[in-house]
Image (cartoon, rainbow, N blue to C red):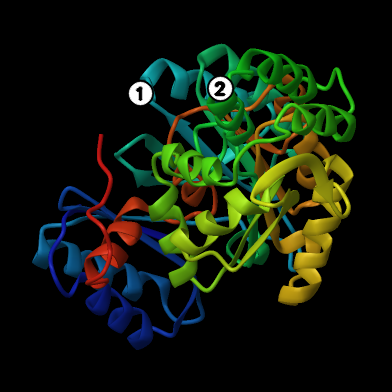
């Protein structure tokens, strides 16, 4: 039997119903409740070994006493051990228009999916909802929603609704144009008056037209003779992506291991790691002799393959299975890293990465990543209020 209760919420309704179920030898099989603006929707699925008529009468009396609408429906028994494929579908938009929600939920229906639950994750700085969907094939659902999301200019993430959803314990982020809004090497070149040459090479590399390692060496050669003091000026010019401090603080409070893996330079990246309280930083190292850049790099280059290797190494160090990792990036040299991660997120990314990533985020707020992990804005804000050292929450 499915007992459905609706009406204005008040204390004691669940307690009264469960007491009646106990008195009439009913066993609770499933139960779910949601309150929307003081309106209660409560569903309890039970099996009954006693007199169903007496239970119906007892439940009806509770409805009369409380002023709630209570419906009782006989349900077909589900075969023991049957499994239904379930997925978490997160919708993000700024704004998230009703037409977009209509189009995306139509795709879910067309793929044979049923929406079992909808939960709001955030009202600001973007609107996001999590839908629990059952019955649809994950691959076809992901492909169909990705196509429609692009048409509607919103973001959609599809993940299996299982234990690993909230168990991803390592997050690795790119730096330039991801954690920060700028390209550090372009700021260095701007200080030396060769920014256009560097920008041209950077663009071709990030679009996948050039080998990253060779393009990096070519760009670094243009910096030969640069005084080391220029690095300090560039660090001061770098702008964190909106939401980056909140993301870093929230992940730290949740016990995540956090890291940045960059094709940029350790002399730039290390201070950012310390500023945000991240655990690890992996980046290239500029050679400096007599207080000036030589135009060369030290050690192995952190390129596309190097970033993936860094993710594997960081996962081993943190004791985290690779399928419980998150990788975030924006360019072609992040492809391998995002491909091997449990969840690969293309953040305001180039087309080549958007096509390959598990999901894309096109809003300009880095903390939107938290919503993909099922963390609500209310949980984030509550943690901010509990931290006396936290900066004010970022609002539009």
Query: Where is mark 1, residue-wise?
Result: 95
The residue shown at (48%, 51%) is 370
Pick the quarter of the image with the C terminus.
top left
- How far is disc 1 from disc 2 in space, using C-alphas? 19 Å
The residue shown at (32%, 75%) is 54
395 vs 261, left or right, is left
Position of residue 34 measured from the top left corner of the image (x, y, whole percent): 32, 56
Position of residue 197 measured from the top left corner of the image (x, y, whole percent): 70, 15
Query: Where is mark 2, residue-wise?
Result: 106
Relative vertical location of residue 349 with respect to residue 65 in this rendering, above or below: above
Position of residue 340 measured from the top left corner of the image (x, y, whole percent): 83, 50
Label 1, residues with CA under 10 Å away: few <14, some 14-19, many ≥20: some
The residue shown at (28%, 74%) is 17
Position of residue 70 measured from the top left corner of the image (x, y, whole percent): 26, 56
Q: Is residue 321 visible?
A: no
Relative vertical location of residue 171 with respect to residue 54 in this rendering, above or below: above
Label 2, residues with CA under 10 Å away: few <14, some 14-19, many ≥20: some
């Amino acid at each position: 039997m499915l007992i459905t209760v609706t009406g204005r919420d008040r204390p004691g309704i669940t307690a009264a119903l469960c007491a009646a179920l106990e008195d009439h030898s009913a066993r609770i099989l499933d139960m779910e409740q949601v309150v929307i603006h003081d309106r209660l929707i409560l569903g309890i699925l039970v099996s009954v070994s006693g007199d169903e008529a007496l239970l119906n009468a007892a439940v009806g009396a509770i409805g009369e006493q409380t002023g709630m609408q209570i419906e009782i429906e006989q349900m077909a028994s589900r075969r023991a051990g049957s499994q239904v494929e379930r997925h978490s579908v997160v919708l993000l938009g700024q704004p998230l228009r009703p037409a977009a929600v209509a189009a995306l939920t139509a795709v879910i229906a067309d793929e044979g999916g049923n929406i079992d639950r909808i939960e709001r994750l955030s009202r600001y700085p973007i609107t996001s909802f999590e839908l629990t969907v059952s019955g649809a094939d994950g691959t076809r659902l992901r492909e169909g929603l990705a196509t429609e999301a692009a048409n509607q200019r919103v973001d959609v993430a599809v993940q299996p609704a299982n234990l690993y959803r909230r168990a991803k314990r390592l997050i690795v982020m790119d730096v330039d144009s991801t954690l920060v809004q700028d390209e550090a090497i372009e700021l260095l070149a701007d200080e030396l008056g060769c920014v256009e040459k560097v920008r041209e090479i950077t663009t071709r590399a990030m679009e996948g037209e050039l080998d990253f390692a060779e393009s990096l060496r070519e760009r670094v050669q243009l910096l030969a003779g640069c005084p080391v003091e220029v690095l300090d000026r560039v660090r001061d010019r770098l702008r964190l992506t909106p939401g980056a401090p909140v993301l870093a603080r929230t992940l730290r409070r949740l016990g995540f291991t956090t890291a940045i893996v960059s094709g940029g330079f350790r002399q730039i990246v290390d201070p950012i790691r310390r500023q945000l309280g991240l655990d690890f930083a992996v980046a290239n190292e500029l050679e400096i002799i007599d207080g000036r850049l030589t135009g060369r790099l030290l050690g192995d280059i952190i390129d596309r393959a190097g970033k993936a290797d860094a993710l594997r190494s960081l996962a081993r160090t943190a004791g985290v299975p690779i399928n419980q990792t998150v990788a975030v990036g924006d360019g072609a040299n992040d492809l391998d890293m995002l491909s091997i991660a449990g969840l690969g997120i293309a953040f305001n990314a180039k087309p080549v990465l958007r096509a390959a990533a598990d999901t894309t985020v096109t809003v300009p707020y880095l903390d939107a990543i938290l919503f993909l992990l099922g963390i609500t804005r209310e949980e984030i804000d509550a943690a901010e209020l509990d931290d006396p050292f936290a900066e004010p929450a970022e609002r539009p």
